[in-house]
Image: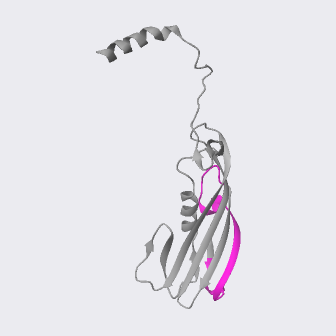
Amino acid sequence: MVTFRFNEIPRGLSEEQLELKADSLGIEHPGIHQVHAKFRFNKQEDSLRIQCQLATVATLTCDRSLEEYKTTLESNYEVVFQLNAAVEREELSGTLRRLESFQNVINITKELHDTVLLSIPVKKLHPRYIKDGKITEFEASFGKKEDDHDPRWDALAELKQKFQKN
């Protein structure tokens, strides 16, 4: 759980860095173990803005080759706590939360959890399949060369040609 005490954060700009275990954020991904978090606070009389920069080294499995590879996942997120905010809203880049006058503990565990999980690519591709920012073609090899001819398929090829002519 990642919490801060509102009264302990100094007014104005301040920063803090933490090394967080993935399970303390509720992350159960087998390839993510630790998250480096850098927080930048901007505390005013009626609001607190927290900018988060998250980085983690993740072990992912390539969708093409099923090989594991390590990559660095980086993401940014911003949470604004506004004193007695009328409406709370959540967007991809940040969140506005209500801060009650009696509230002292600020919990941003959910926001950090979601930000780390959203930084995992939908299509996981080993870096060797990416050259100059472009995805290379995939070459599959199943133990046979393209020059090898299997005569058992000749009859099917003849039928296929016959149907294509008709």
- Residue range highlighted in magenta: 4-32
Quarter in which the C terminus is drawn: top left
For image coordinates 54% across by 75% down, the residue present is 79
Q: Tell me, yes or no, whether the highlighted magenta stretch contains residue 16.
A: yes
- At x 57%, y 58%, the residue is 119
Residue sitting at the far bottom? 45
Q: Nearer the viewer, residue 53 or 133?
A: 133
Asked whether 85 or 24 is in front, the reply is 85
Q: Is residue 96 left or right of residue 66?
A: left
Percent position of residue 101, x then y: 51, 88
Q: Tell me what residue is drawn at x 57 percent, y 71 percent.
A: 108
Q: Nearer the viewer, residue 96 or 134?
A: 134
The question of residue 107 being in magenta is answered with no
Horizontal side of 80 relative to 25 (left or right) equals left
* Residue at 66 percent of width and 68 percent of height: 37
Residue 52: image location, x then y, percent: 61, 71
Q: Quadrant of the N terminus?
A: bottom right
In the image, residue 58 lies at what x, y percent? 66, 52
